[in-house]
Every structure is written in structure tokens, then in C-alpha cells.
Image: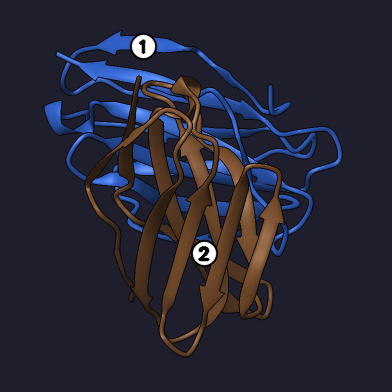
Amino acid sequence: GQNIDQPTEMTATEGAIVQINCTYQTSGFNGLFWYQQHAGEAPTFLSYNVLDGLEEKGRFSSFLSRSKGYSYLLLKELQMKDSASYLCAVREGGAGSYQLTFGKGTKLSVIP
Amino acid sequence: DSGVTQTPKHLITATGQRVTLRCSPRSGDLSVYWYQQSLDQGLQFLIQYYNGEERAKGNILERFSAQQFPDLHSELNLSSLELGDSALYFCASSVDFKETQYFGPGTRLLVL
């Protein structure tokens, strides 16, 4: 099984930078995903890491350390529309059978 | 818009009843996943199909079943419904079982 931990809530100011951390424990790591989810809507794919290091995509970056079981999502130049839940998900498995396990999400509130 | 469609958007039913949720994956995607999201549990993986065959099973109750048809659309059947089954049910699809999952808009189920 898996254990994924991320903070329940965070608040940040418009224009600032925020880092959302995720720690996990898994026996068959096969990649880590970040999704954004606005209330009542579908999760939207943000980023994917399978190797250690930083992946940058516009205002969003994601970092992975497999040895530490740790990832973070970095959001720069925060905008009000970034207020949402951010879900960390770990993929586990192999041989044609993969499963995504999601953390409970971090609710980010961006304030003026 | 992810390209994944789900019907119906909303469903209200009574305890003990049976419902069917439908999902059409993105064009070209062979793999379909079903998730349940309730307020206290977060996003829970239920089951995965790939090209018509069941590939992985998560926390799916025996009262629930699913299938993927030759045209690749999928249906999730929920029977003997209980109040606790009230949740958002998401379908996701990917090209194959190793690729990024893209989520549909969800079906909001309310059991009264």
C-alpha cells in the first residue's frame, strides 16, 4: 500500500511564490503526478516526474527526490485563479498494471 | 476540456436502487479508470480497464461493477445503493496504462 502526505490547506498572496510539499511511501514507485482541481470540477494534469530533479512548465515546477520519497509543486507569480486543490498522486505497479494513488489534496487560497 | 465525456452530470436516487454511469474516453485512448471522490476520503481509485480487459482493481465494493465495451466506452454499475455512496464519480482515460490520465467532468451522485 501507499501513504501520501500533503498539507491540508495553505494560503498565499497574489504575485507570490508557494511551495506545496508531498511525501510518500511506496514499494513500487513508477512516477509522481500533480493535478489541480477546482471545487466540483475534474482534476487537471499539471506535471509528471519519474526521475529525480526539477521539471519546469511555465509558472509551475515540480521536483522529485525518489530516495527521500519527496516531491514539491512550486507555483510562481500566483494568480487568483490558482486558488484550487492540488493533488499529489503516486503511480505504482508494472507489467501492464499501474495504479494511481492520490493524496487528500492541498487546498490553496490565493488572497489579494 | 479533456476530451473525456461522462453522463449523466447529476444523479439523484434512493437507497437500495441501482444506477449506471457512462464514460467515453478521449479519442485514441485505450485505458479507462474509475475513481470515487467523497469529502472525507479524497480521490479513490476503483478499477481500470485496458482495451476491454480489466487491468487493476482498487477499493471497489462488491456492489459495484464495471465493464469496457468494444467501442472503448465504459460503464460503472452501482447497486444496492447506500447513503455513503453519495460522491463524485470520475472517469479518466489514457493512451495506454503507462501514460498520463485525463479526467472527465464527473457524475455527482446523491443517494437519499
Q: Are marks 1 and 2 in contact (CB under 8 Å)?
A: no
Is A56 left or right of A76, judged from the image as shown?
A: right
Q: Mark 1 points at which residue?
A: B11
Task: Give percent across and percent down for residue A35.
Answer: 52, 45
> Identity of the amino acid at label 2?
Gln
For this orientation, the residue located farthest to the bottom is: A67
Task: Give percent across and percent down for residue A28.
Answer: 50, 84
Mark nearer the viewer, 1 or 2: 2
Colour scheme in the image? by chain
Q: Residue at x 76, y 57 (%)?
A: B96
Is B5 left or right of B22, judged from the image as shown?
A: right
Q: Please tell me whether residue B23 is drawn above or below residue A95 in the rendered image.
A: above
Q: Chain A is drawn in which colour?
A: brown
Q: Colour of chain B?
A: blue
Q: Residue A47 carries which label?
A: none
> Hey, which quadrant is residue B5 in on the image?
top right
Q: Which mark is residue A99?
A: 2
Task: Give percent across and percent down for residue A54.
Answer: 64, 68
Q: Where the N terminus of chain A falls, by quadrant? A: bottom left
The secondary structure type at the circle numbered 2 is: strand
Of the pair A61 and A27, the residue shown nearer to us: A61
Q: Residues within 10 Å of mark 2 (few under 14, many from 20)?
A: many
> Identity of the amino acid at label 1?
Leu
The CA span between labels 1 and 2 is 27 Å
Chain of residue at mark 1? B
Of the pair B8 and A26, the residue shown nearer to us: A26
Q: How crowded is mark 1: few (under 14 residues within 10 Å), some or many (20 or more)?
A: some
Of the pair B76 and B109, the residue shown nearer to us: B109
Q: Where the C terminus of chain A falls, by quadrant? A: top left
Do discs 1 and 2 share a chain? no
Task: Give percent across and percent down for residue A34.
Answer: 52, 52
